[in-house]
Amino acid sequence: MATMTAAQKRAQTKAEYDAFLAACPSRKLLDRISDKWVTLILAALGSDGSHQPGIDCAGEPRSMRYSELSRLLAGVSQKMLTQTLRSLERDGLITRTATPTVPVTVCYELTDLGLSLHQMMRGLKSWAEMNMDDVLANRATYDTRVL
Amino acid sequence: MATMTAAQKRAQTKAEYDAFLAACPSRKLLDRISDKWVTLILAALGSDGSHQPGIDCAGEPRSMRYSELSRLLAGVSQKMLTQTLRSLERDGLITRTATPTVPVTVCYELTDLGLSLHQMMRGLKSWAEMNMDDVLANRATYDTRVL
DNA sequence: CAGGATCCCGCTAGATACTG
DNA sequence: CAGTATCTAGCGGGATCCTG
């Protein structure tokens, strides 16, 4: 309809998928990306961290090797790391590149789609780190209030 | 130290908590907020949705009743809704206000701390809705490639 | 209306062992 | 190095019933 306003178009676009609805596919997608390991992986890829630029295989700053990720995301099991990476690859958020060296070298890199989430994930991680003290204080207050 | 630059101060603030470390409390906090129901609740509170302004008990736009949330977040069980609301209250992200009407009326409202997460959660939800088609296409491509 | 309490199943995270 | 395969314990989370 040519008479549709921009606001109406936006409303329709948002109405196409709605994560508030249980049956909507976007609900499951939201569930997927609302995951500790997903958040950490997407926040890690593209971050500098302890990751020296220039030593990654693709030569791009937003790529990281399996072992690098494994070390950076302390405490992650191989199973969860691999599983999460696979799902992110399937969803087109990251790419997996294996170069047939000996031994094999595998790089994971953000796609443009993944990059669009990267900022939010860093934001989430930063939020947790910056507001940790506040949350801790709130919990202490709440717990004494309940007793 | 008076000789510390702003960049160094920022680095130190970030170093205080690091969600990449398994033992860091912020890792657990990140795990908490990386949750489907947390995301949906925080995105719901303060949104207009199908929520007419003026009928909420506190008269403020970012407050919502238990039954409203229960209806908006389709498919959520009472257990998960209550459990998640409690944890959000404990962390100081929302407040719970019970007015002794008959029957009792309970309102949940974002705190300032919760409000600071609200934007990110809306962003996450919007991202899932807006990129659903892309992700679906990527999955289809990936699945045929694997076969 | 807004939960509390309980039961119970499924699945998933984690540990362990093995491999190209 | 970068995984795969297998097993199991634990708990997340739904269903159900009850209450102030």
Image: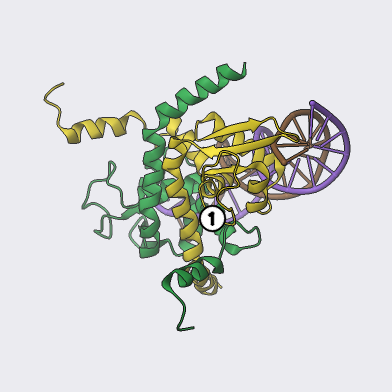
Chain colours: A yellow, B green, C purple, D brown
> At which x and y percent is residue A6?
17, 33
User: In this orientation, which residue lies closer to the viewer: A84 or A97?
Assistant: A97
In percent of the image, x 51 and y 31: which residue is there? A91
- Left or right of B126 in this view: B138: right
- Left or right of A63 in this view: B47: left
> At which x and y percent is residue B106?
37, 57
User: In this orientation, which residue lies closer to the viewer: A26 or B110?
Assistant: A26
Q: Residues within 10 Å of mark 1 (few under 14, many from 20)?
A: many
- Left or right of B78 in this view: A65: right
Residue B136 shows up from this direction? yes
User: In this orientation, which residue lies closer to the viewer: C10 or B67?
Assistant: C10
Q: Amino acid at mark 1?
A: Leu
Q: Which residue position is annotated with label 1?
A: B30
Residue B133 position (above or below residue B46) = above
Task: Quarter of the image for the N terminus of chain A: give it.
Answer: top left
Residue B145 position (above or below residue B36) = above
| Circle 1 chain | B
In percent of the image, x 66 and y 54: which residue is there? A74
From this viewpoint, which residue is outermost toward the bottom? B2
Residue B86 shows up from this direction? no
In percent of the image, x 51 and y 20: which residue is there? B141
Residue A74 position (above or below residue A14) = below
> At which x and y percent is residue A119?
43, 48
User: In this orientation, which residue lies closer to the viewer: C4 or B38?
Assistant: B38
- Left or right of A135 in this view: C18: right
Q: In what element is the residue under mark 1? A: helix
Task: Quarter of the image for the C terminus of chain A: give it.
Answer: bottom right
Q: Tell me which corner region of the image, top left, top right, bottom left or bottom right, holds residue A79.
A: top right
> At which x and y percent is residue C18?
87, 33
